[in-house]
Amino acid sequence: EAGVAQSPRYKIIEKRQSVAFWCNPISGHATLYWYQQILGQGPKLLIQFQNNGVVDDSQLPKDRFSAERLKGVDSTLKIQPAKLEDSAVYLCASSFRRVSRLAGGPYEQYFGPGTRLTVT
Amino acid sequence: GIQVEQSPPDLILQEGANSTLRCNFSDSVNNLQWFHQNPWGQLINLFYIPSGTKQNGRLSATTVATERYSLLYISSSQTTDSGVYFCASRGNDMRFGAGTRLTVKP
């Protein structure tokens, strides 16, 4: 099966500009996650969607970051305006929530290749 | 939120050596995954292991949920094993550890 797709793979912008990232999850995966990974650190969850509803956005800087998942499939993450400290890799992941806990798990996540953002 | 600690932070091995990576978590979790992030940044699933033991080739993992830790074993390491290994757990939210950076030298 196809994996999680993300675009663009790389983006360089100046501070105060806007940027948007796109994610297409694995077909049939109801849950979608956006993470921010700063160099040398583990990924930090920004927002989690279940279908097209937000489950957790407690770590999303809502003054500048926004995300949507229209129709419960693709998702976009936007930063407006960008700051230098937003330079990071933005990772998208998806998981298939199962009722049964047999074979794999309800929260087993699969990651896309990421978008590397550089803010100058 | 839950705290996830990984050790050691860095590990350098000769090819062929074995290693054990540890992940401690501060509270009860209902989900535990191990990932390998390769030098190109791709996070690759290794194990989904909320409890018990699983093996996949040269890698195996054990989670003791009651004692709040998980171990990842790498046997007969190869240079392609180099990269950063993360554990991630879910209590009320999803948390990653800071990772163990593994370098396997030929």
Image: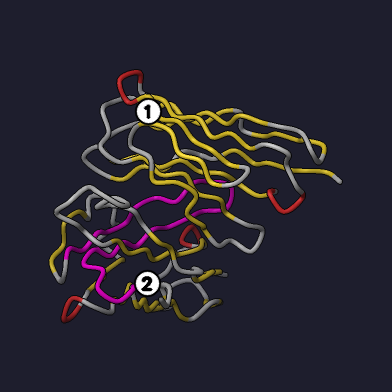
The x, y position of residue B35, in whole percent, is: 50, 49
Quadrant for residue A17, please give it: bottom left
SS for callout 2: loop
> In the rendering, which numbered label is found on residue B67?
none
The x, y position of residue A57, in whole percent, is: 22, 55
SS for callout 1: strand
Segment tinted magenta in the rendering: A26-50
Taking depth in this image into account, of A13 and B45 the one nearest to the observer is B45
Residue at mark 2 shares a chain with residue at mark 1: no
Q: Is residue B14 above or below residue A11?
A: above
Asked which colour scheme the image uses, the reply is secondary structure
Name which residue lies at 34% across and 62% down.
A34
Quadrant for residue A4, please give it: bottom left
| Chain under disc 2 | A
Q: Is residue B103 above or below residue A1?
A: above
Q: Name the amino acid type tagged 2.
A: Pro
Q: Alpha-carbon neighbours of circle 2 within 10 Å: few (<14), some, or many (≥20)?
A: some
Q: Mark 2 = which residue?
A: A81
For marks 2 and 1, give the CA distance: 35 Å
Name which residue lies at 46% across and 80% down.
A7
In the picture provided, is B80 more to the left or to the right than B41? right
The x, y position of residue B12, in whole percent, is: 76, 35
Q: Is residue B30 above or below residue A28?
A: above
Q: Mark 1 = which residue?
A: B25
Taking depth in this image into account, of B29 and B95 the one nearest to the observer is B29
